Amino acid sequence: MRVPTIADVSAAEGRLRGLLPVTPTWSYPSLSETCGCEVFVKHENVPPVGAFKVRGAFNLVAGMSVAETKRGVVAYSHGNHAIALAYAAARFGVDCVVVMPEGPDPAKAAAVRSYGAKLVESGKTFDEARAFAERMARERGRRLVPPGDDPDIIAGAATAYSELFAQCGELDALVVPVGSGGGAAGACLVADHLAPGCEVIAVQSAASPAAHDSWQAGRVVERPNRSIVDGLATGTGFELTQRIFRERLDDFLLVDDASVVLAQWFLLRDAHTVAERAGAAGVAALLAYPSRFAGKRVGAICTGGNATEAELRLAVESGATGRFPNASSGE
Ligand SMILES: Cc1ncc(COP(=O)(O)O)c(C=O)c1O
């Protein structure tokens, strides 16, 4: 698969201009104090569909050939990528099928359908939904749109990072939540070009460490997938994003799910913003590894805001007690 370049990122910026808003980046003194470093929150929880995934989806669909456009697209996703692709496909008049693991979050399923996409539930896990979508793409000639392992998705996601560097200047580090790795791969491409001194640090849940372990092993590996952090819960690494990580990623940190839930609370309290769990993972890394970031200027990407009611209840309870309530009672 073709490795995207900074020229692809520039092309994506051109395609997205006028279609998507520039998202804000703010620093909140109380959040910085909580984390022990100067934190710049990039609010990718506020664009249409409430997640950075909209960037890659728009870039991919806007760049498709006429023939591809006629055959349609098929995606597999827990939610945000699916909603983003459904939204982009509707905007460009492309037929869209989304495959989700059985029993998806009703709000995310409703959002997919609201854009006119067909929703197919298949398999118990993300990886089973993926196998179904791959078969459908082969059999029906639709373009398969993975959540991250695609040059157009990565180049689209990367535009968040060129915006971020323009908004807050020099940073010592970026902390980027990873599922399939498309967002962090985009961060690597942009940092390499615009901010070679800035460390790019990936973050994943210790309960679903496939991307982390793939990076450490230097090859794609499979791992148990037990995290409650939806967007980061994958059971395998992905080829293209891992290739980019091997070139540029500086570090890869694991956080436990409890610290992600607590980070959601701190984002609510200190940054007045709703983050879904995956969107809070960057801040969770700042909390979990304070000496790694002490006194530095750090960009934390709040990658999405599609939190369920149960998620938010658990986050508030976690904030009130300062510890992680029993997840099974809160879910
Ligand atoms: C809110 C959110 N953050 C982070 C991620 C992980 O992104 P990636 O798959 O590009 O690593 C996802 C993936 O769906 C997501 O929805």
Image: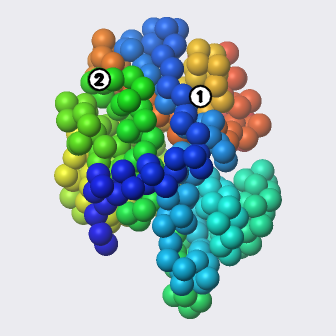
The front one of 184 and 96 is 96
Residue 324 % position (x, y): 60, 27
**Residue holding disc 1:** 264
Q: Is residue 43 visible?
A: yes
Q: Secondary structure under badge 1?
A: helix
Say above or below: 43 vs 72: above
Left or right of 201? Residue 55 is right
**Residue holding disc 2:** 170
Q: Is residue 204 visible?
A: no
Q: Could you tell me which residue is drawn at 66 percent across and 30 percent down?
A: 274
Say above or below: 187 vs 156: above
The total of numbered circles placed on residues is: 2
The front one of 189 and 308 is 189
Say above or below: 274 vs 189: above
Q: Quadrant of residue 113?
A: bottom right
Residue 122 % position (x, y): 66, 73
Say above or below: 133 vs 91: below
Of pointers 2 and 1, the one earlier in the residue sequence: 2
